[in-house]
Amino acid sequence: MSSSAPNAVLSVSGIGKTYAQAVLSNIDLTLRRGEVLALTGENGAGKSTLSKIIGGLVTPTTGQMLFNGRAYAPGSRTQAEELGIRMVMQELNLLPTLSVAENLFLDNLPNHAGWISRKQLRGAAIEAMAQVGLDAIDPDTLVGELGIGHQQMVEIARNLIGDCHVLILDEPTAMLTAREVEMLFDQIARLQARGVSIIYISHRLEELARVAQRIAVLRDGNLVCVEPMANYNSEQLVNLMVGRELGEHIDMGVRKIGAPALTVKGLSRADKVLDVSFEVRAGEIFGISGLIGAGRTELLRLIYGADGADSGTVALGSPAKVVAIRSPVDAVRHGIALITEDRKGEGLLLTQSISANIALGNMPAISSAGLLNASDESALAQRQIDAMRIRSSSPDQLVSELSGGNQQKVVIGRWLERDCAVLLFDEPTRGIDVGAKFDIYALLGELTRQGKALVVVSSDLRELMLICDRIGVLSAGRLIETFERDTWTQDELLAAAFAGYQKRDALLDEAAPRDTL
């Protein structure tokens, strides 16, 4: 057998995959040696399924593949990796109770006579981490103690160790800072120079224009375009992806911003969140910006009672009434909801149906005397499937079979059934395609028109600038500055994000002992 195109490292022919319904149909695609091939499309279009087939995680229903001119049909991810085909998924493949170094070399721990060589392991880990800009992190740190952005960089570093011929990156920059994105792009250029072929999955079209030579667009499981990247601008690609035109702006509708609904005063926890105070009014979207590690997620967890605060108060209503929130149960009872950034680890039961997942937060509405009403559960789920445009075969479909964006919609749909006055959104559009993002933005607008107070954490500054009424910037655990709509610029927001670290570093320099002659 031979490759279907000159200089082809990987070819797929007639690839299809069917679960409850077809999610991929007759895909023909070639990956050239040393190129970056962008793969994009709406959630549910089949991007992740195709990449998982190539990476050995999913077996295709139809079709065949060639790798370096030979038949390729991996029975597992391990088999694919042994051949040099690696995949960095949105859902990380790390063990939180092991150190960064141990995660990096879990399959090949340096040892002597059965004893792990800690010195050798640490040295190898430092070298691997330096490639992706993790120099400042101690390799002995437990992965579970890192933020999700840093965890993603560890996952990328793990896949770059050893012999890599094809690297699949699934939304690799979704949780990275601008600096980390640039370091990733530099690494991609170095990999290309070594002849490594890269499949780059992303909804961030400006990134694709920077790194990719060709682009493949999937829509509803079909390949609708494989062309040089230079042939298309962002607007044309969006139209190909969604089959309809989308504007660059969103009308959040006529809203009435009322009295404060959430008041946070002096909230602190260790060195993660330091004396943070702000208020959010009814009908308002309050954005929280900042670099990875700035304390954004930690702040939401304190408000929600998922972590205990060392000091500070949370108050609701106007006049503000301080409430005791010692756990998420307390938060929900007081009308506070949290849509977590880690949908798979904290937001979903992957082995359960859409109905069961949406029902989780709404048991009183669909049960009586401790007995669940199956028809009410199904109707509740169908209502959210329709409202959220969740792509699925039925309410009975397993959540694990949905795309990442549709899984996120299930999480959001669960909370929409509850009458929560305050909703905390942590990266609500992470891993969601450009069409679905506008659906989510419209939903946020509708919630504010109902008088809800929204707090939105996002790594995408343009997203916050698009939807928020005010943006507070966290830096090194402190709320540095709050900007009003029409008064902010991207440069000012970025400057504020770095300001806390610069001040902290200056104080550390002043406190450091000086050498004396």
Image: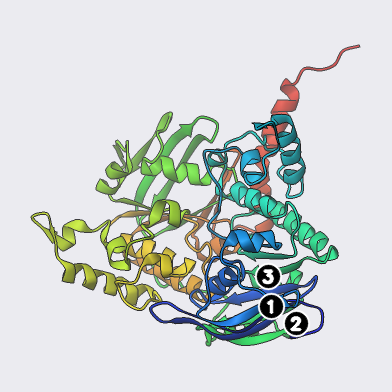
Residue 53 spot, x, y in % from top left: 57, 72
Quarter-of-image position of residue 215: bottom right
Determine which of the numbered discs, if any, sits on residue 199 in the image. Answer: 3
Residue 149 spot, x, y in % from top left: 60, 50
User: Label 2 is placed on what type of residue?
Assistant: Ser
Disc 2 packing (10 Å; few <14; some 14–19; many ≥20): some
Which residue is more in the foreground, 5 or 488?
A: 5
Residue picked out by circle 2: 3
Residue 252 spot, x, y in % from top left: 44, 71
- Mark 3 or mark 1: which comes first in sequence? 1
**Residue shown at the point (41%, 58%) measured from the top left:** 284
- Location of the N terminus by quadrant is bottom right
User: Label 1 is placed on what type of residue?
Assistant: Leu
| Secondary structure at numbered mark 2 | loop
User: Label 3 is placed on what type of residue?
Assistant: Ile
Asked if marks 1 and 2 touch (Cβ < 8 Å), the reply is: yes
Nearest-to-viewer mark from 2 and 3: 2
> Would you say 133 lies left or right of 357 here?
right
Q: Residue furthest left?
A: 369
> Would you say 67 lies left or right of 349 here?
right
- Does the image show residue 107? yes
Residue picked out by circle 1: 66
- Mark 1 or mark 2: which comes first in sequence? 2
